[in-house]
Image (tube, rainbow, N blue to C red):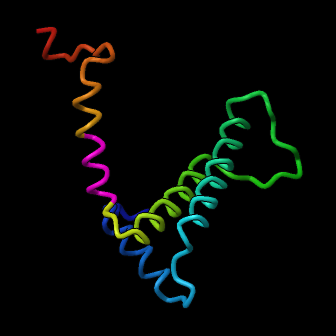
Amino acid sequence: MYNKESIQDMQERVDQYISQFKEGYFSPLSMMARFTEEIGELAREVNHQYGEKPKKNTEEENTIEDELGDLLFVMICFANSQGFSLSEAFEKSMNKIETRDKNRWTRLERQEDKE
């Protein structure tokens, strides 16, 4: 069973893990390359599951969930190395999106709107 951790908890957990090694966090360019690599692996899994490219018998079993987890780890490493709070970054992003896009799409009718 998984523990529900806040983003801050995840950032602290990753930092505790990385801090035990002399090498520490990778450079920003290396992390960008790693992030891009993980995006590619996620794209490959999505293509296997929803696209026209079936998996070869020799290919490793991965899931979209696994690849999203890898991507999240790299994103947390990148944020930590730059001293960013992902909670704050998310809040800023959601405020922007909720303001800019509030009338962009057709809203679903809620039950209380029907009454």
Look at 21% across and 17% down and name the residue there: 110
The quadrant in which the C terminus is found is top left
- Which residue is at the front of the view, 25 or 50? 25
Q: Is residue 2 magenta?
A: no
Name of the residue lying farthest toward the top: 114
Please state the extent of the stretch shown in magenta in the rendering.
86-94
- Which residue is at the front of the view, 43 or 83? 83
**Image location of residue 96, percent across then percent down:** 26, 37
**Image location of residue 6, percent across then percent down:** 31, 62
**Image location of residue 90, percent across then percent down:** 31, 50
- Which residue is at the front of the view, 76 or 107? 76
Look at 19% across and 16% down and name the residue there: 111
Name of the residue lying farthest toward the left: 115
Numbered-mark total: 0
- Is 93 situated left or right of 41 in this image? left
The prevailing secondary structure element of the residues shown in magenta is helix
- Is 94 situated left or right of 56 in this image? left
Look at 40% across and 75% down and name the residue there: 13
**Image location of residue 41, percent across then percent down:** 68, 50
Figure quadrant of residue 32: bottom right
- Is 87 situated left or right of 60 in this image? left
Look at 40% across and 70% down and name the residue there: 80
The quadrant in which the N terminus is found is bottom left
